[in-house]
Amino acid sequence: MAHSCGKYADFEGLREQALALRREGLSRRQIRDRLHVHNNDILNRLLQGEPPPTWTKRPNAKDDLRARARELRLRGWTYDQIQVELGCSKSSISLWVRDLPKPERKRTPEEASAIARRGWEATLRLREEERQRTKERAKESVGGLSARELFLVGVSLYWAEGSKDKPYDRRESVTFVNSDPGMIGVYLAWLDLLQVERERLRCTVMIHENADVLGAEEYWAALVGPDVRFNKTTLKKHNPKTVRKNVGDSYRGCLVIKVLQGAELYRRIEGSWYGIVLGAAQPVDAISD
């Protein structure tokens, strides 16, 4: 593009100088300062089509993967094979090797499908490993709980999963229901912290009638300990039109834990919960990873 007047009138001559400097290995900044071209648009046009020297490229964490992918592609490997070998996405592989020739097809559609399936399985495996690493780091970061921390956790758990008093239905009773043994364990530890004797607890198993009722009863009894009395199990009628997903050996129904003479305890729970609400309204320091 020629400029008829002004500083860049001899555009083609200026472009020849810019390209020559680029081929000598100068960076954009060096060429800009050498030719006194401080307009980025003009500089882009002067250098259009000329690749930057290798030394100006920033190092990339995936450079080794890219080089390996190109090597495998030149050996005739497909995207699926490279994905299985390197554990990276097809989109990245495509970007890295798109200028290389395509290998000849040497497999049946069934073989290609099997390779693709293995590639996807490898991707899922990597995702699951990262998921588990994140969970493990989070678990380890918690450490031991102080009495105050356990108290606040227990109040929050109860307010999420326990029975609550209503203005139109005054029932100041402490009843907690859950199917997660971890939740039940934390709740029992919280009751111990509050010095609620196990003799004051009454438990009831709630489970579908076509599940392993006896196995569930034995499981929950072992979890809460021998000092807790159990009421008769409540069986839920099975609806043949309903497709249940909570089936299998891990399904043990829900456990209901009621504290006898719990009105005073309920008032403490409700008051503590609203104290947490007020506390959360104040500025709180963020938790770093």
Image (cartoon, helix red, strand yellow):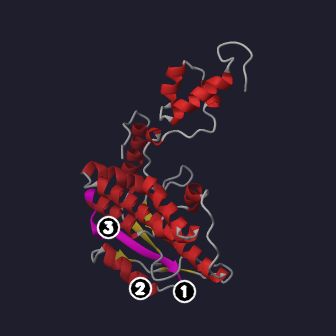
Magenta stretch holds residue 206: yes
Residue 259 percent across, percent down from the top left: 37, 64
Q: Is residue 162 visible?
A: no
Quarter occupied by the N terminus: top right
Residue, disc 1: 210
Circle 2 packing at 10 Å, graded few (<14), some (14-19), many (20+), is few
Q: Residue furthest right?
A: 4
The answer to whether mark 2 and mark 1 are in CB contact below 8 A is: no
Q: Which residue appears at 52% of the width and 69% of the height?
A: 75
Amino acid type of the residue tagged 3 in the rendering = Arg
Count numbered badges in the picture.
3
Q: Earlier in the sequence, mark 1 or mark 3?
A: 3
- Where, by quadrant of the figure, is residue 106 drawn? bottom right
Tell me the element at label 3: helix
Viewer-proximal residue among 256 and 17 = 17
Amino acid type of the residue tagged 2 in the rendering = Gly
Which of label 3 and label 2 is nearer to you?
A: 2
Q: Which residue appears at 45% of the width and 78% of the height?
A: 250
Amino acid type of the residue tagged 1 in the rendering = Asn
- Where, by quadrant of the figure, is residue 134 drawn? bottom left
Residue, disc 2: 215
Residue, disc 3: 200
Circle 1 packing at 10 Å, graded few (<14), some (14-19), many (20+), is few
Taking 118 as reference, is 130 above or below it? above
Q: Is residue 8 visible?
A: yes
Q: Measure how far apart labels 1 and 3 are at the Cα level.
A: 31 Å
Taking 261 as reference, is 156 above or below it? above
Q: Earlier in the sequence, mark 2 or mark 1?
A: 1
Q: Earlier in the sequence, mark 3 or mark 2?
A: 3
The answer to whether 271 appears left or right of 227 in the picture is: right
- Where, by quadrant of the figure, is residue 74 drawn? bottom right
User: Range of the magenta residues?
Assistant: 193-209
